Image (cartoon, rainbow, N blue to C red):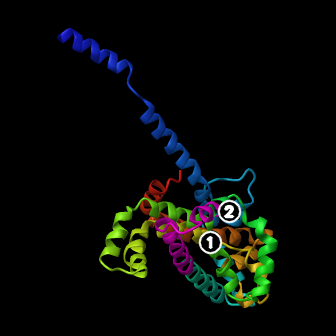
Amino acid sequence: MLQVDVDYLKKARKHRDYSGPIILIFLSLAGIVSFLPLIYLVSTAFKPPEELFLYPPTFFVRNPTLQNFSDLSTVTSNSLVPFSRYLFNTVFVTVCYLFTLILVDTMACYPLSKHKFPGHKALFKLVTTALMFVTAAAGIPSYLIITKLGIDNTYFVYIIPGLASTTVLFLMKQFLDQVPNQIFEAGKIDGASEWKLYTKIALPLLKNAQATAIILSFGGIWGDAGTSNTYIYEENLRTLAFFMNTIGGNVARTGATAVSSLIMTLPSIIIFIIQQSRVMDTMAHSGIK
C-alpha cells in the first residue's frame, strides 16, 4: 500500500500543473509593459532640455529638473484667458456631465431591466446595435442636432451630446439584470412607488456600476480637446484639454508639452486606482470580458 502511494506521488509530481504560475508571470510582464508609457511620460516631464533632444533618446531621466514646470507656468501666464478659467470650465463641465450621465442612464436601465413593457427587447437590441458605431460616424447628425437646438457655444455642448452613452447604458442594464426581481417585487408588496424602487433599491445596488461608468467616461470628457470644442467660438468657454493641446507643436515647448500631458493623464489614473475594485466587480457581474 505504501509503495502504491509513493508511486502515485511520483506520478503527481510529474504531471503537476504549471499553468497558474505561467499565467501569473505573463500577466505580470503584460502589466509592466503597459505601465512603461506612464513611466516614460513622468520621466520626460522632469528631463532638462539637453536630455529631451538626445539621440538615441534615454528612457529614464538622468538629471531631474523642474524647468519644464516653470516653462508651462510661463506659457499659461501669457495666455489671453487665465489658466484658472480653463481649469474651472473643465471641472464644471466634467462634474455636470458625470452627474447627469449617471442620472439619465440609471433611469433608463431600470425599466429596461425590470419592466417588460411592449418593445423593450427591440429597444435593447437597438442599444446593442449602436455599440458598433464610432462617434465619428454620427458627426454630421450631431452637428445638425446641436445647431438646431442652439446649444453651440455654450456649456451644454459638452454635456448633452454625450448623455446617450450606449456603452454605459448596456453596462448598467447588464449589471442590474443580475439583481433578483424578488427584491423589487417585495418593495411593491410593501407599497413602494416606482420612484422609491428606483431611488431606494436600484440606485444603491448600482453603486459599483456607477463608479465604473464614471471611470470609463471621465477620461473622455476630461481630455476632450477637439470633439466638443469645435462647437465653441469664445475662448473663455474652452476647456483645459484644448488649451493644453495648443501648447504642442513648438520644439522649444517640448518639456512643457510633456508636463501638460502628465497633468491631463494623472486624474484619470488616480480615479481608476481608487475605484479599481468596483470596476472589477462590475465587469464580473455584467458579462463584459
Q: How many marks?
A: 2
Disc 1 designates what residue?
A: 264
In the image, the segment drawn in magenta is 99-126
Mark 2 or 1 closer to N-term?
2
**Dot 1 crowding, Cα within 10 Å, few <14, some 14–19, many 20+:** some
Magenta stretch, main secondary structure, is helix
Question: Residue 92: which numbered mark, if any?
Answer: none
Q: Which circle, 2 or 1, is nearer the viewer?
A: 2
Image height of 28 relative to 276, above or below? above
Image x and y of residue 103, in percent:
52, 78
At x 53%, y 65%, the residue is: 269
On the image, which quarter does residue 200 sit in?
A: bottom left
Q: Is residue 68 visible?
A: yes
Q: Residues within 10 Å of mark 2 (few under 14, many from 20)?
A: few
Residue 213 lies left or right of residue 90; in this view the side is left
| Disc 2: which residue | 130
- Measure the alpha-carbon separation of dots 2 and 1: 29 Å
Residue 65, magenta (yes or no): no
Q: Nearer the viewer, residue 128 or 188?
A: 188
Task: Identify whether 231 is placed above or below 32.
Answer: below
Quarter of the N terminus within the rendering: top left
Image quadrant of residue 137? bottom right
